[in-house]
Image (cartoon, rainbow, N blue to C red):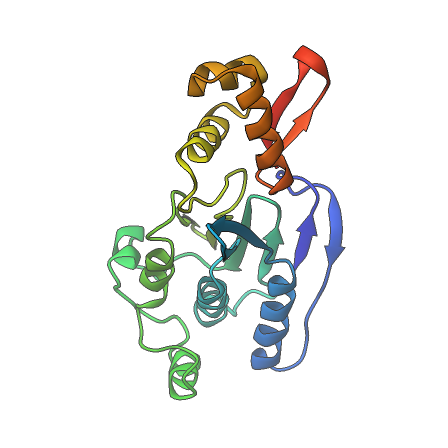
Amino acid sequence: AAVFADDDNTGFIDHREFGGSVFSQIESAFEYIMLNNKTKSVFSGIDRIDKTDYPEEAIREALLNAVVHRDYGFSGSIIVNINSKCIDIISIGGLVPGLAEEDIMNGISQPRNRNLAEMFHRLKYIESYGTGIRKILSLYSDSSVKPTITVTPNSFRISLPNRNSGKVVKAAFPKQYQAVIDYLNEHDSMTEDELQELLNIKRTRAYNLYKKMEAEGYIKVSGRGTGKIITLK
């Protein structure tokens, strides 16, 4: 497993390899990924709402899927790449002959390693055959970003997108807060004049609003005077 500083996965921040039993490897890899699964907080009134970058169960299901369905005729390792936008989990071996990607999405399962799958099922690591991918998709049902699957003749990759990447998690904000956040999610930045125009408010009100949002951790204000630039934090 590796953590990268860039979205092209070219600059390492950290790298780990895991040995031991297959169960030990899964647990160690899961714990390592969770160390990099950050939590973002937003506030609804006085209530704080926490949301992790990735659903915990989606990570576990993706790891289990890679271990149970990989082709052990090859000696290469399962690859886990982590960056600010997504987690890619890549296993050796494409789909079992006769299956298409659409079949997998529909819950059709033909285990490549039946004995291993049965052992994981008996030990309650997996609930039943063919449910893992659908469970991962359901865990993203309330998110604007969705997992993707890429299949080649010799590899299977599932990408879990960061639910918090570049976005502020929506909550019951004041309407003006939400309007600013929606604008910044779409345009990346805004000026003080654009803020006034967006909300149809005077300069003093705009100043008080963005200072309050900055203090509460929603936005970042850079520059001075008329050159101020407002971005999401």
- Image quadrant for the C terminus? top right
In the image, residue 197 sits, relative to residue 48, either above or below, namely above
Residue 28 lies, in percent from the top left, at 64, 73
Residue 107 lies, in percent from the top left, at 26, 63
- Image quadrant for the N terminus? bottom right
Residue appearing at x 43%, y 51% in the figure: 153
Place residue 2 in its image quadrant: bottom right
Residue 144 vs residue 102, the one in the foreground: 144
In the image, residue 150 sits, relative to residue 218, either above or below, namely below
Is any part of residue 97 visible from this angle? yes
Is any part of residue 77 visible from this angle? no
Residue appearing at x 74%, y 48% in the figure: 12
Relative to residue 147, is residue 82 drawn left or right?
right
Place residue 198 in its image quadrant: top left
Residue 136 vs residue 71, the one in the foreground: 136
Place residue 65 in its image quadrant: bottom left
Residue appearing at x 70%, y 24% in the figure: 222
In the image, residue 207 sits, relative to residue 37, either above or below, namely above
Q: How many numbered dots are placed on residues in this image?
A: 0
Residue 30 lies, in percent from the top left, at 58, 69
Relative to residue 12, is residue 226 drawn left or right?
left
Residue 41 lies, in percent from the top left, at 55, 52
Residue 2 vs residue 211, the one in the foreground: 211
